[in-house]
Amino acid sequence: MNNKNIQYFLTVANEHSISTAAQKLYITQPSLSQAIKRIEDYVGVPLFKRTTNGLQLTNTGEQFYSTAMQTEKIWQNFSLNLSAPDTLKEGTLSFGITMQLGLKVLPDILIRFHQKFPKVNCNVHDAAHTQLEKEMMDGSLDLAITHIQHHQEHPTLSYDTFFRDPFVIISSPERDFSDIPGIITTGPHGPEIDIRGLKGEKFIYTKRNNQTRRIIDATLARGSILKPEEYLVNNQFQTIQALVSANLGIGIIPRSYLVPSIQVNIYNIPEEYEAYWDSCIITRKNYTLNSLERSFVQISKDICIAKCT
């Protein structure tokens, strides 16, 4: 068993396909199939099973995957955990961050991190949450800073959640919902709105097939709004808030992304609608962070909490 075999195994596991993995590794498909068979012979049990969704890991394969991921990083961990002062540590940290969150916190994170680790280079990739998860699984990233809901977690990744950010309904100051009896109540944290009373309203949405939109659609569905009127679509929270302020529709965005200078009415959403996401750090399951990565995680948490509360 050598490092090349581990790379072969990890690539097949992440791609769920011998042919796709072979292309990525620039080797022939028969050669890769033989290499996987040799690994399974060495372990003594099958590591993969064929399904309608491609090759999936067996229970033993899941355990082997976790061990292989840790083996890949062991030398880097060793060198970075030496007793040298932080300012003398060198290396590269590759991490991902969602685009909206990056706009809010990335400059401060990088400034503070480089003050502590001036000789460490950072490779930063901003992308959608699902893309960051994929790059975590294929080993392209060491960790990722993103938002998650608990039921969206991937079984091969670990999610260190540290801040819950509720979504809120926003409307123009000219739209106070006083014409809908009983829709506004007083909740523990201020005025709450009954989602069911929003049928027929024009919504300013984020685009389909992203995490924010999925949370919004699920929230409205819990209020029996299955086909809301999609009046305008934009992926920037600040732009959505500006459009709402101009009375072009109502919006649903995370509270921490509200811009105080843009005037809107703000309504909380009752807890039973599960309208929230959690800020989190994603790492690979059963992977032990080295000292540099632990410092980066703590810096990121501190700044995210300071910026988002």
Image (tube, helix red, strand yellow):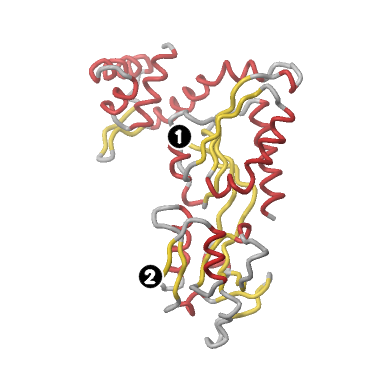
Quarter of the figure with the N terminus: top left
Residue 113 lies, with reference to residue 43, above or below; the image says below
Residue 163 lies, with reference to residue 270, above or below; the image says above
Quarter of the figure with the C terminus: bottom right
Q: How many marks?
A: 2
- Mark 1 burial class by Cα count in 10 Å: few <14, some 14-19, many 20+: some
Outermost residue to the front: 246
- For the residue marked with disc 2, what is the amino acid? Leu
SS at circle 2: loop
| Residue under label 2 | 226
SS at circle 1: helix
Task: Name which residue lies at 34% across and 27% down.
Answer: 12
Are dots 2 and 1 in contact, CB under 8 Å? no
Instruction: Please report whichever mark, 2 or 1, sits nearer to the chain's N-terminal start.
Output: 1
Question: Mark on residue 94?
Answer: none
Residue 228 point in image, percent of width and height: 40, 71
Residue 45 point in image, percent of width and height: 34, 22
Outermost residue to the right: 85
Residue 241 lies, with reference to residue 41, above or below; the image says below
| Residue under label 1 | 135
Splitting the image into 4 quarters, where does residue 62 fall?
Answer: top left
Task: Name which residue lies at 53% across and 76% down.
Answer: 194
Residue 277 point in image, percent of width and height: 55, 55
C-alpha gap between disc 2 and disc 1:
33 Å
Task: Name which residue lies at 58% across and 66% down.
Answer: 168
Residue 17 point in image, percent of width and height: 29, 30
Task: Name which residue lies at 48% across and 28% down.
Answer: 66
- Mark 2 burial class by Cα count in 10 Å: few <14, some 14-19, many 20+: few
